[in-house]
Image (cartoon, rainbow, N blue to C red):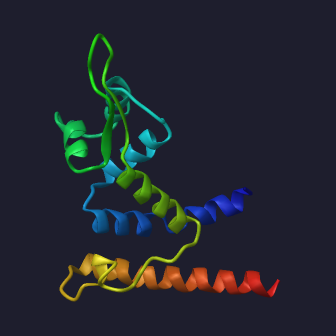
Amino acid sequence: MKSKQLRDYLKYYRVIRHFFCAKYKITYPDLELLYFLSSEKYFGREDFDKYNELFSWEDKKLYRLIKDGWIDTFREHKSGNKVIYKISYKGVRMLDSLYNKLSGEEIPEAPSNNPLFHKNVRYTSKVYRNMIKEMNAFHKEQRLKGEDS
């Protein structure tokens, strides 16, 4: 990937991140922690804690992410073996969708698929909603330019 393409890949990162956090009711730090952990096929508590040190301290974060369905236990603790975790199917699907959006897939504008498009939302959501419309138009235009070439 050329460096210009990489910059374009991240052009709408903030808008996409905001959409995903709103849609999946997840915090920015949790999302970023899932990015990191998704590159590890399996991880232990030590791996989790090492990267989690970069974020504000929360004693029960791992257990909350398990309870919320973002992380699964791959191997239980028994006979001297440590517990091993992995990103859940739900987490993998969400991250795959996020990467697709970064690659130019449009964000839905229907209120049924995007909480930012509900009627009674805060001003900030309206600002992001307008940026999503602009981003989607940009991606449509880019695809049309690609078809003409």
Instruction: In the rendered view, tell whether residue 65 sits above or below residue 120.
Output: above
Q: Residue furthest right?
A: 149
Name the spot of residue 147 as percent of width and height, x first: 76, 84
Instruction: In the rendered view, tell whether residue 95 sits above or below residue 82.
Output: below
Question: Which image quarter: residue 23?
Answer: bottom left
Name the spot of residue 3 as percent of width and height, x first: 71, 56
Image side of residue 103 versus residue 2, left or right: left
Of 66 and 17, the residue lying toward us: 66
Instruction: In the rendered view, tell whether residue 93 sits above or below residue 124.
Output: above
Name the spot of residue 39 as percent of width and height, x first: 50, 40
Of 110 and 89, the residue lying toward us: 89
Of 33 and 72, the residue lying toward us: 72
Image side of residue 87 versus residue 103, left or right: left
Name the spot of residue 92 as percent of width and height, x first: 43, 52
Image side of residue 47 versus residue 12, left or right: left
Of 143 and 10, the residue lying toward us: 143
Question: Which image quarter: residue 127?
Answer: bottom left
Question: Which image quarter: residue 79?
Answer: top left
The residue shown at (30%, 24%) is 83
Q: Residue furthest top?
A: 80
Instruction: In the rendered view, tell whether residue 86 sits above or below residue 31.
Output: above
The residue shown at (31%, 43%) is 71
